[in-house]
Image (spheres, rainbow, N blue to C red):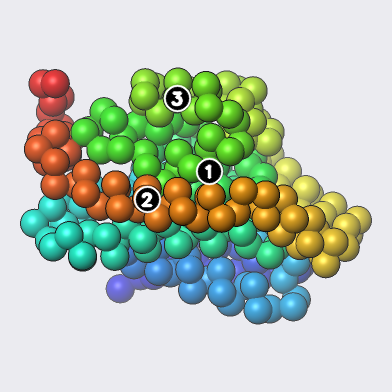
Amino acid sequence: MESSIILEKSNRIGKITLNRPEKRNAMSPELVEGMLGALDEVESDEGVKVVVIAAEGKAFCAGADLAYLQKMQSFTAEENLEDSRRLMNLFDRIYNFSKPVIAQVQGHALAGGCGLVTVCDFAFTVPDALFGYTEVRIGFIPALVSVFLQEQIGAAKTQELLLSGELISAEKAAELGIVTSVVEAEFLEKEVQDFAKKLIENNSGQAMSTTKALLRSLHQEERQQKLEEAAALNAKSRSHPDCVRGISAFLNKEKPNW
């Protein structure tokens, strides 16, 4: 069975590639655990100074694996909470990671996939990529990402994006500060590599790590408390009739009648 994560290390860059192109890199438990393991490996490797998160296929990440979430709707509350906390741990791990993390977004980043971009330090995207926190459209809630997004772009814009579930362009995502730069597809990889190289050659790794830790220390206790609350809400919402109906409709390629 092919691994859902590919880890490569070269030129002091650790590249973690999502490798479920046939599922639009939807976040299964295996993919999340694979990412956590890869992050552990590159963090402990002194030869790696910068991390890049990329993806295979047309989509960067479509968010949660809805077929798996549908199965979990019949699981116990404890099992759902454990699964929700797994994603919380991934987002939190990236957000607090001791080395700079760059998202290389070659396609759409939706729902939890957009959350993944949100928690990276930098994000470079192609012009055609769409971004959106689309959970409300299937009766689910964008619980975990709300904590990080509000901290980054403010309450009003977060509310607009999360309550509307609207898709936004790469240009709009850049205006909001969700992505760093919009780059033509043919130059995306080179742009990311060049930017990573600048960080590696021009900046002290220790200074970047300490600066990031300082920034993350602001509101840290409140953030952790809110993340735990969000994980619990994420788990609880899965069994709500709206979520059951919404995921079923999506998987059957139907539009739910709200």
Q: Secondary structure at mark 3?
A: helix
In the picture, which quadrant includes the N terminus? bottom left
State the separation of the CA atoms marked 1 and 2.
13 Å
Please give left or right for residue 127 compared with residue 181 in the image.
left
Name the N-terminal-most of marks 3 and 1. 1
Quarter of the image for residue 134 reads: top left
Circles 1 and 2, Cβ within 8 Å, touching? The answer is no
Query: Which residue does the numbered mark 3 point to in the structure image?
Result: 159
Vertical order, 111 against 167 (above or below): below
Query: Which residue does the numbered mark 2 point to in the structure image?
Result: 229
At label 2, the amino acid type is Glu
Vertical order, 30 against 203 (above or below): below
Q: Residues within 10 Å of mark 3 (few under 14, many from 20)?
A: some
Q: Where in the figure is residue 20, as x and y percent of width and height?
A: 36, 56
Query: Which residue does the numbered mark 1 point to in the structure image?
Result: 148
Identified at 40% across, 28% down, the residue is: 162
Vertical order, 222 against 167 (above or below): below
Q: Secondary structure at mark 1?
A: helix
Q: Can I make out residue 240 in this image?
A: yes
In this view, the mark in front (2 or 3): 2
Q: Nearer the viewer, residue 44 or 152?
A: 152
Please give left or right for residue 203 compared with residue 173 in the image.
right
Q: Secondary structure at mark 2?
A: helix
Q: Where in the figure is residue 118, as x and y percent of width and height?
A: 54, 42
Identified at 46% across, 53% down, the residue is: 225
